[in-house]
Structures are given as structure tokens and as C-alpha cells.
Amino acid sequence: MCGRYTLFVDQDDLEDRFDARFTEPFAPRYNMAPGQRLPVITSENPETIQSLEWGLVPSWADDDSNGLINARAETVDEKPSFREAYDQRRALVLADGFYEWTETDDGGKQPYRVAFEDDRPFAMAGLWERWEPETTQTGLESFGGGAGDAEAGDGAGPLETFTIVTTPPNDLVGELHHRMAAILEPTVERDWLTGAASTTALEPHPADEMVAYPVSTAVNSPATDEPSLVESV
């Protein structure tokens, strides 16, 4: 499972690395959490880096609750919640590290940050969706109100969300958790977006260039987002 991650690379460097431009100013993030609007590149707009909400809501869902933060690589092309997005709406989720927790001898949990040795940015395989609330009629049209009185079920417009694909862990992450984010090789990132890359691109990334180190339990709170979170303790 991937439930928190980081991205604090300079904006210009990110734009150069992914050959895409932010649609709004980017600020470094040290504790990215579900429910937040975070930077992704979508198959629909591959030249821009947009902010979508983490927690995929299928287009056919009755409401926008219970967003799905992860999708398993082994079944992402089969599960009803992800199948259509896998075929038509893929994404690159930008990161430079992610957190995992391991149990301690005293029954607590110790967070670890996993990243490349040089803290270089990478793309996690993702899917995205656009969910729109159903419209309902007020009934006023019978009294001359007309179609203009239709209103959204919750008063909101379209909601764009994403999920991160996970895969079995490499040897490094396997010491911390039984799943890890599917990190794409740079050479297949665009193929993933276009659909040319299949689930074979979702193998666990080799551990030889990666590191994992303990960090402060302050990362447990999604309200905490500061540079000290990525420092080793």
C-alpha cells in the first residue's frame, strides 16, 4: 500500500524532467495524503501537470465518498472500479519518495521514507477518473421554471480523482510492507499514459538504487507538512 508520499523537487526541475508544465504554482510537499489535491499528469493532458484529488471515485459511483487510494497491479485491468480507467484514463503520479510503516517491539509503528539514493523524482503508475453528480429536477418546470432549474445532487461540479497502482515489494520495501507503489521506468512513462504499456510495466522497481530510513512519527498526522519529516531519526 502507498498511503503517503513526498515531492519537494524544484518546480523547474520537475517540469524539465517530465516535459510538462504546471497549471498552477507548485509548493514542495513533505506529507502528501489521501483527500488532498496533488500533482499528476493525465492521459487527457500529457503536456500539463494538474492537481487532482487522491482517492479515485469511479464515474459510475452513486456518490463521491470512499475514494480508492490504491489499485493492485495484478487485477487493475479486471476490477470494475479500475477497468475503464486502465483502458482509457491513465496517469503519472509525481513523487520523490513515499512512506511505509513497520511494527515496533512495543506495539507501535515506525515510519520509514523510501526514495532513490539521490532523491530524484519519479512517476508512480496511476489511474484517474472524472465523476459528475447526477442532476435532479426541482419540479418547478411544471410551473414555468423550465430546465434552467435543474440542480446537481450535491451542488458540486465534476470531481477529478486519481489512484496509485501498487505491486509486490522489492527486497528493500519487503522488509517494511507487503506492497509498494509501482514506479515506472522513465522510458515507459509515456507508453503508460497512451496505453501502449501493459501491466508488465508494473513490476517492482529494483532495490539496488533505493534507500529506506526511519523518520519522525510526526508524519503520522497528515496536517503536518514540513521539511523535518524527511530527515532521518
Image (cartoon, rainbow, N blue to C red):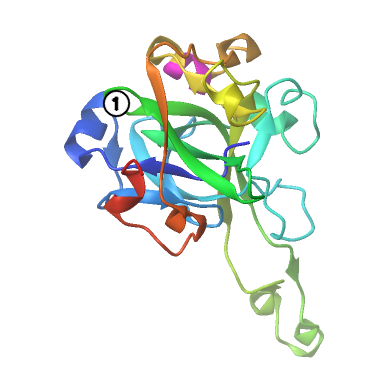
Where is residue 163? Give x, y as percent. Answer: 59, 40
**Residue that lies at the very extreme toward the front in this rendered image:** 106
Q: Nearer the viewer, residue 170 or 81?
A: 170
Answer above or below: position of 67 versus 98: below
Most extreme residue toward the bottom is: 143
Give the x, y percent position of residue 223.
Answer: 45, 65
Count the marks: how many?
Answer: 1
Left or right: where does residue 191 sit relative to residue 122?
right
Helix, strand or loop under label 1: loop
Which residue is pictured at 48% across the width and 34% down the height?
44
**Label 1 is placed on what type of residue?**
Arg
* Residue 112 seen anywhere in this rendered image of the structure: yes
In the rendered image, the quadrant that contains the N terminus is: top right
Residue segment shown in magenta = 189-193
Image quarter of residue 96: top left
Above or below 186: residue 76: below
Query: Residue placed at 70% from the left, 85% from the top?
Result: 145
What residue would you read off at disc 1?
120
Q: Is residue 141 above or below residue 210?
A: below
Seen in the picture, residue 28 relative to 82 is either above or below; the reply is below
Depth order, front residue of 176/97: 176
Looking at the magenta stretch, what is its main secondary structure?
A: helix
Residue 95 showing in the rendered view: no
Residue at 62% x, 74% y: name it. Answer: 155
Q: Position of residue 97 (x, y in %)?
A: 40, 34
The crowding category of the residue bearing disc 1, from other C-alpha atoms within 10 Å (few below 14, some 14 to 19, many at least 20), is: some
Is 85 contained in the magenta span? no
Residue 66 picture location, percent across and down: 72, 56
